[in-house]
Amino acid sequence: MCIRDRAIYVRLRGEGVEGESRVNFQVHGYSYEAAMMERCPEGRGRTDFVETLQQEKGLAAKCESLGEPLPGGDHNTQWRLHNDTERLVRAQATLELWRGGKLVSKSSKGVKLLGDHAETIELDYDLRDAGEFELRFIERDLQRKQDVFVARVALSVPRLFAADYGWRLSDPEADVGVWWCESARKISRSRPLPAERGGRIRISAARNERESFQLVVHPQKAMTNVCVSVTDLRGPGGARIPSQNIAVSRVGYVRVESPTDATGVAG
């Protein structure tokens, strides 16, 4: 059977010598292997380390999911808040996304934690570009007006998954999204529709030159028997480019298995 969960959790356990209550160990790496009984959809995995910066005794938070930190991905995070004290805690949980010292997005949610109680909350962030980011989670005690838990995690989004280029031709709610961009781009298969609307495709070329562009079709469900045709291009003053001078080619996707430098990524 195929693994249908969005995440696989690996528990690491260390055993110390008899008589010692604490065990310290450092993980340099680990591998996970599984045999699939049938063909599964293409997927990718990643490991993110959540660093605890501040924690008050009796109050803690655990990150259960960071979603999919890519443009167009699922940006919903889940956090498990623990109140191991006997008192009622009225808290505010805040999730901030930072890049280069600037706040990119912020979401907050109030929560009431009973004594000796735990609760799971969800917070979203807005990630639209490639680059280096930092996600910060802050739990604040509203009664005492102080932070009781602070954590952060570094997010690195390769340039392949950038979504800051291209122009959308279709409406955002359309069943089939259509957009275009320059011909030199490699477009990720998870790339969302561009936010910027462009009413038409615009390219420029001098006489006897060739110029290309990419037209991207992004359907909400599978499509069959898709055909693309072109007509003559007409411009001011009676200018015309006959349709027989326009070539339509399907762009192949070249999957990279082994990146050749630090800026590359498999995919």
Image: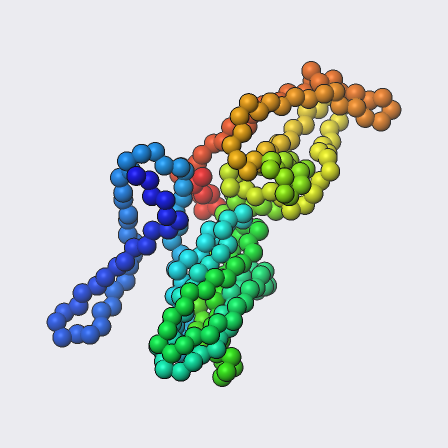
Q: In the rendering, at what x and y percent does residue 227 appear?
A: 60, 22
Q: In the rendering, at what x and y percent does residue 29 appear?
A: 29, 54
Identify the residue at horizontal 55%, vertical 38% (top origin): 220
Q: In the rendering, at what x and y percent does residue 139 appear?
A: 47, 72
In the picture, which quadrant includes the N terminus? top left
**197 and 262: which is toward the camera:** 197
| 163 to 225, vertically: above or below | below
Identify the residue at horizontal 71%, vertical 33% (top origin): 201
Left or right side of 190 for 51? left
Q: Residue furthest top?
A: 244
Query: Dividing the picture into quarters, in which one does residue 235 lie?
Result: top right
| 102 to 32, vertically: above or below | below
Query: Dividing the picture into quarters, in which one does residue 257 lie?
Result: top left
Is residue 260 in sight in this rendering?
no
Identify the residue at horizontal 73%, vertical 28% (top origin): 205
Q: Residue furthest right?
A: 237
**165 and 83: which is toward the camera:** 83
Identify the residue at horizontal 48%, vertical 72% (top origin): 111
In the picture, which quadrant includes the C terminus? top left
Coloration mode: rainbow
Left or right side of 1 for 236? right
Q: In the rendering, at what x and y percent does residue 159 appear?
A: 53, 46
| 207 to 189, vertically: above or below | above
**91 and 25: which is toward the camera:** 91
